[in-house]
Image (tube, rainbow, N blue to C red):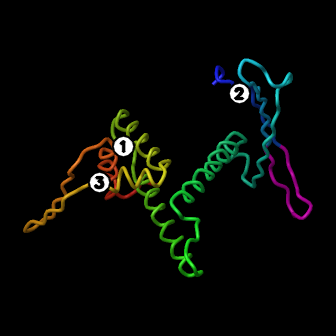
Amino acid sequence: MIEKGYKNNVLVRESYAEFEYQPTSCEKAYRMVVVRKEIECSGGQQRLFDDDHVRYFFYITNGSKEKYPPREVIRQANQRCDQENTISQLKACGGLSAPLHDIESNWAYMVFASLAWSLKQWSGLLVQEKGPESHRKKQRKGKRRVVRMEFQTYLNSLMLIPAQIIRKARQTVLRLLTYRPSVDLLLLIHDHAGRPMKV
């Protein structure tokens, strides 16, 4: 990155503070957590700013200090920022588009696309971590991979797998006609799909 001359931001240090904040229209005060990040910006071999670039992030919450210390508020806020990835995935699978000519058809189209995307998320969230640590690590990795996977990738790697359905007297056999690494992930999801989720 440095050799190619791209702009590069590096977090140098981070600190946080907390204080009470009451907006003028509110009857009670809320907790405000402020994060101060010092970022060094460089382009290639040259620093772009003589002084460190400082950014502030503000998080407002009504959670108690005992239940949500400042670090926990920051951690949860950072997890919510991942919603941008969710929105981009919904756009990619057509969940936020309106391609048809009337309101009811567009509504149905968006519902179907959102349900398809939700199926992808649920199939990943069904994977439970159990067994020895080596198995738990593999399950954790597979779960995260499915949840963060783009819908088109999910469709091509886990749904569109050639298979043969064989009906016998008392059973139905599903025979996969090809193997690729994503089949292991599909079998992992299948293994956990029938189990009740632990809360």
Instruction: State the separation of the CA atoms marked 2 and 3.
Output: 42 Å
In the picture, the disc for residue 10 is 2
115 or 76: nearer the eye?
A: 115
Tell me if residue 55 comes above or below residue 124 in the rendering: above
Queried whether the magenta region covers residue 25, the answer comes back as yes
Disc 3 is placed on an element classified as: loop
Q: Seen in the image, is 184 located left or right of residue 63?
A: left
Tell me if residue 17 comes above or below residue 178 in the rendering: above
Q: Which residues are magenta?
A: 19-33
Which residue sits furthest left? Answer: 169
Q: Residues within 10 Å of mark 3 (few under 14, many from 20)?
A: some
Q: Which residue is mark 1?
A: 130
Q: Nearer the viewer, mark 3 or mark 1?
A: 3
Q: Nearer the viewer, mark 2 or mark 3?
A: 3
* Rendered image quadrant of residue 24: bottom right
Identified at 38% across, 34% down, the residue is: 133
Q: Seen in the image, is 56 located left or right of residue 122?
A: right
In the picture, the disc for residue 161 is 3
* N-terminal label among 2 and 3: 2
Which amino acid lies under the numbered mark 3 shown in the image of this protein? Ile
Identified at 71% across, 21% down, the residue is: 44
* N-terminal label among 1 and 2: 2
Residue 75 coordinates in the image, percent (x, y): 65, 42
Tell me if residue 5 comes above or below residue 66 in the rendering: above
Residue 126 coordinates in the image, percent (x, y): 40, 54
Which amino acid lies under the numbered mark 1 shown in the image of this protein? Lys
Instruction: State the separation of the CA atoms marked 1 and 2.
Output: 37 Å
Check contact, mark 3 vs mark 1: CB within 8 A.
Answer: no
Which residue sits furthest right? Answer: 24
